[in-house]
Image (cartoon, rainbow, N blue to C red):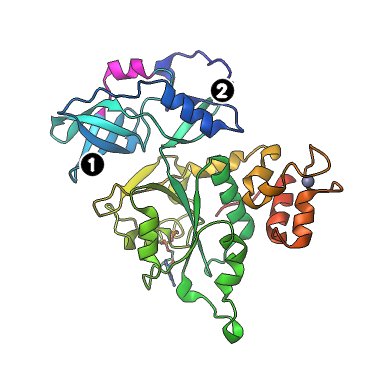
């Protein structure tokens, strides 16, 4: 059960927040809580226009309209603020209805219940979370075959973050034009590196330069809100530009600067991908702070999907799968049913080793 909410004056809270539930099932708890606090049927006025919040600036929100290529800079009326006291008011990713008040401005009239949230613990509070993104459907982790070389531990960290938030993950392997073919028709450099992952996650081989794999990627993204993350320099901006979102990004934006660039902020932004489907990609620097917080060690095994068939089969019910005898996970590694590299990643993360994300 969530602990009782801390009482704080609302108008001193600068950022959206929700209560933090049990971390084990926090997403499911969020879903129940966020969905359960409001009536299932929203009172929709025919004059209200449906849209999605694509960017937040304090009390102002850019709402991209669903049925026309317009964005309204919108505010929230006091009535709505009072109704939604028990959760954060509006976050990027929220599906809303706005009334057009003219001159490119709107007023948010209703907000659909959130299906999920990507959240992190708020600073200086023990019992609140900040919503980084509402309604994420999945996450796309982009790495490159070379330049820069893929980093196993970092990829595992990303995947654990996705698992801990119950977000389906897709792995995008970009710069496949730089791949090195295998000898005698054997697996290429990329295929060798990502073989372990292909058994667990969808892996897409891509080239922003040659436009390889983009049709398949487009299908993966269609109609969804996809968080895109990965180290800098792997070609995320290039890929997204090739997919033709509104509001193009500058290629090389981060790597040419301090190596941090826009990732030092926590502002999330959604980009709509051209086409009639409601397809958005999310640029969410806040993902780094989620990763920074990590997951509690006892939840780590669950975050490796290939371990799950063996969890509960160990001799000791509190087995950490690092050194205990008669450990079903370690037995699966010895049998080759679980990748040794992935298992070693688990052990290193369980020891609390930190992976820096450039
Ligand atoms: P980001 O930091 O992940 O957004 O990466 P960028 O999109 O800024 O790309 C970093 C560098 O990689 C740029 O010099 C791009 O031209 C280059 N690049 C991006 N995609 C590809 C690709 O598919 N193949 C090759 N060879 N280079 C690419
Ligand atoms: Zn075990």
Residue 105: percent from the left, percent from the top?
18, 32
Which one is nearer the viewer's eye here, 251 or 18?
Answer: 18
Residue 253: percent from the left, percent from the top?
40, 57
Q: Is residue 227 above or below residue 127?
A: below
Taking the view exactly as shown, the residue that stands out farthest to the right is 325
Asked if residue 78 shows in the view, the reply is yes
Q: Is residue 159 magenta?
A: no
- Kindly report the distance in space between the C-alpha atoms of the residues bearing marks 2 and 1: 35 Å
Q: What is the secondary structure assignment of the residue under circle 2?
A: loop
Q: Which residue is mark 1?
A: 66
Q: Is residue 140 above or below residue 134?
A: below
136 with respect to 296 (left or right): left
Residue range of the region highlighted in magenta in the rendering: 75-84
Chief secondary structure of the magenta span?
A: helix
Which one is nearer the viewer's eye here, 30 or 141?
Answer: 30
Taking the view exactly as shown, the residue that stands out farthest to the left is 102
Quadrant containing the N terminus is top right
50 with respect to 115 (left or right): left
Residue 25: percent from the left, percent from the top?
58, 32
Residue 126: percent from the left, percent from the top?
59, 23
Q: Which residue is mark 2?
A: 127
58 with respect to 158 (left or right): left
Total numbered labels: 2
Asked if residue 122 shows in the view, the reply is no
């Amino acid at each position: 059960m969530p602990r009782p909410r801390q009482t704080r004056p609302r108008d001193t809270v600068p950022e959206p927040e929700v209560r933090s539930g049990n971390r084990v099932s926090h997403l499911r708890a969020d879903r129940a809580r966020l969905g359960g606090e409001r009536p299932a049927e929203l009172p929709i006025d025919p004059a209200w226009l449906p849209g999605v919040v694509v960017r937040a600036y304090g009390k102002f929100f850019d709402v991209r309209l669903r049925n026309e290529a317009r964005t309204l800079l919108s505010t929230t009326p006091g009535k709505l603020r009072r109704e939604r006291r028990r959760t954060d008011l509006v976050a990027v990713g929220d599906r809303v209805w706005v009334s057009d008040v003219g001159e490119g401005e709107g007023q948010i009239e209703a907000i659909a219940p959130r299906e999920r949230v990507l959240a992190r613990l708020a600073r200086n509070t023990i019992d609140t979370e900040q919503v980084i993104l509402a309604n994420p459907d999945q996450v796309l982790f982009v790495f490159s075959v070379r330049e820069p070389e893929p980093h196993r531990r970092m990829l595992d960290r990303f995947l654990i973050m996705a698992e801990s938030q119950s977000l389906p993950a897709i792995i995008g392997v970009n710069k496949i034009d730089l791949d090195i073919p295998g000898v005698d028709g054997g697996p290429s450099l990329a295929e060798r590196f990502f073989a372990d992952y292909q058994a667990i996650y969808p892996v897409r081989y891509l080239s922003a330069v040659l436009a390889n794999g983009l049709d398949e990627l487009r299908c993966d993204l269609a109609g969804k809100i996809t968080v895109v993350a990965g180290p800098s320099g792997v070609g995320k901006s290039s890929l997204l530009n090739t997919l033709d979102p509104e509001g193009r990004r500058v290629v090389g934006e981060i790597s040419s600067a301090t190596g941090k660039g826009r990732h030092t902020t926590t502002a999330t932004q959604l980009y709509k991908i051209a086409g009639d489907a409601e397809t958005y990609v999310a640029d969410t620097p806040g993902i780094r702070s989620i990763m920074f917080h990590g997951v509690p060690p006892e939840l780590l095994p669950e975050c490796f999907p290939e371990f799950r068939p063996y969890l509960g089969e160990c001799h000791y019910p509190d087995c950490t799968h690092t050194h205990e005898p008669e450990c079903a996970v370690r037995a699966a590694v010895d049998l080759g049913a679980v990748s040794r590299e992935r298992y070693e990643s688990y052990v290193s993360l369980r020891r609390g080793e930190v992976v820096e994300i450039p």
